[in-house]
């Protein structure tokens, strides 16, 4: 009943393996792309990416394959970005918050109330007409953004009790992703924010360093947070997005034909992920309840009101305003 925590030694040995130059090792002369993920092997992101790799390998007759490293084996998201940028790792899944740290315009797709539903979100973040140049904006850092998976709707959970109004969060230490806007978000919602990498949250909740965190139900249960923070309150404050990023130089090595196969199979992966997400969410809720966690309905109005300044202060550039308006008008 504890979360698998990777020892530093395990992380280092995984890195050593990578650095030792099985890089682009692949079988039979092909290239195996290493992809850093912070989720478990059961998580929809792992499943969809693993299947993506298998289809890519088939479609390119083994010239390209993907190996997904789960559980932060290659590093937590902040390190993963660095490793993809310098080419040590080829690809990673990173939260929108991480890219917003590099280019503020990424904030727009990670704001409260911007998407009505997961379908709405997927139609926006994977629509080239809407995203425009945003996804190539980090190529000076050798990072290409390929599109996104949903993180589902995020809500608050604590070890202390239900959170039904901002005042309930007073004095509570809530984990956030390493992100200024999420820090601000929790403060506006009434709590006190502690930025921390995903893989460290379980232990911090268990030891009482944290009173709570915020995430979707799938992470709540796959990270076993539900065992130590039993009250999940449906604040539904935002629908988060996870981006697939890739080293730009590496991507440029693909022939046009292989790149087309890559793009096609990635779109299939997004669809598969979105479908898996629904079932995974239902299963997570059932598992949490069976383990004694409680889900609380929340009147979200007070939180929405409290969060309005976050939206206002994020829409300060022309690009941000354009993206926001395009996202809103794509609502079904
Ligand atoms: C979700 C999301 C991850 C993110 C995590 C977090 O699980 O899919 O990309 O890292 O939340 O809160 O850190």
Image (cartoon, grey):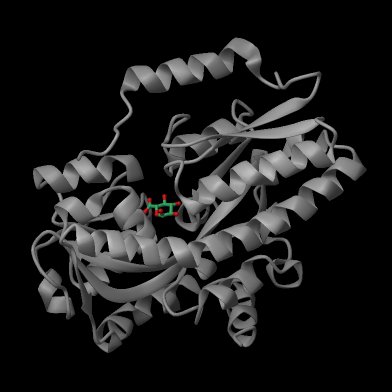
Residue 184 visible in rendering: no
The quarter in which the N terminus is drawn is top left
Residue that appears at 34% across and 45% down: 198
Residue furthest to the top:
20
Q: Quadrant of residue 112?
A: bottom left
From the image, which quarter does the C terminus lie in? bottom right
Asked whether, in this view, residue 93 is left or right of residue 184, the answer is right
Coordinates of residue 128 in the picture (x, y in percent): 75, 66
Q: Is residue 146 above or below residue 30?
A: below
Point out residue 232 in the picture as x, y percentages from the top left corner: 22, 67
Q: Position of residue 214 (x, y in %)?
A: 29, 61
Residue 56, placed above or below residue 101: above
Q: Position of residue 310 (x, y in %)?
A: 38, 74
Q: Is residue 245 above or below residue 307?
A: above
Specify whether 12 is left or right of 1. Answer: right
Q: Residue at x 78, y 46 (%)?
A: 262
The residue at 82%/30% (across/down) is 63
Whether residue 53 can be seen here: yes
- Give 79 or 58, whichever is nearer the viewer: 58
Q: How many marks?
A: 0
Front-lying residue, 16 or 321: 16
> Quadrant of the rendered structure where residue 304 is?
bottom left
At 58% across and 11% down in the image, what residue appears?
Answer: 20
Image side of residue 172 versus residue 274, left or right: left
Q: Quadrant of residue 9?
A: top left
Q: Is residue 162 above or below residue 146?
A: below
Camera-nearest residue between 123 and 134? 123
């Amino acid at each position: 009943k504890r979360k698998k925590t990777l020892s530093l030694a395990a992380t280092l040995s995984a890195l050593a393996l990578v650095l030792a130059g099985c890089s682009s090792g692949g079988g039979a002369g092909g290239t195996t792309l290493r992809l850093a993920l912070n989720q478990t092997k059961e998580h929809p992101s792992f499943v969809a990416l693993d299947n993506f790799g298998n289809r890519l390998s088939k479609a390119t007759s083994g010239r390209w394959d993907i190996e997904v490293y789960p559980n932060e084996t290659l590093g937590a998201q902040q390190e993963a970005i660095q490793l993809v940028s310098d080419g040590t790792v080829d690809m990673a899944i990173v939260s929108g918050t991480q890219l917003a740290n590099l280019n503020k315009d990424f904030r727009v797709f990670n704001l409260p109330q911007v998407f009505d539903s997961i379908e709405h979100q997927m139609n926006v973040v994977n629509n080239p007409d809407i995203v425009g140049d945003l996804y190539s904006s980090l190529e000076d850092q050798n990072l290409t953004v390929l599109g996104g998976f949903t993180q589902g709707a995020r809500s608050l959970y604590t070890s202390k009790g239900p959170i039904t109004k901002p005042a309930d969060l007073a004095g509570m230490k809530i984990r956030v992703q390493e992100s200024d806007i999420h820090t601000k978000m929790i403060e506006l919602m009434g709590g006190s924010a502690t930025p921390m990498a995903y893989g460290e949250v379980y232990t911090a909740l268990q030891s009482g360093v944290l009173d709570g965190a915020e995430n979707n139900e799938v992470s709540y249960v796959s990270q076993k947070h539900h065992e130590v923070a039993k009250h999940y309150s449906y604040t539904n404050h935002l629908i988060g997005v996870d981006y697939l990023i890739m080293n730009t130089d590496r991507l440029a090595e693909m022939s046009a034909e292989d790149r087309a196969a890559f793009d096609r199979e990635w779109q299939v992966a997004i669809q598969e992920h979105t479908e898996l997400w629904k079932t995974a969410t239902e299963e997570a809720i059932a598992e949490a309840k069976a383990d004694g966690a409680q889900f609380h309905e929340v009147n979200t109005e007070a939180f929405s009101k409290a969060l309005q300044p976050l939206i206002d202060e994020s829409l300060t550039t022309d690009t941000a305003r354009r993206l926001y308006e395009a996202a809103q008008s794509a609502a079904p």
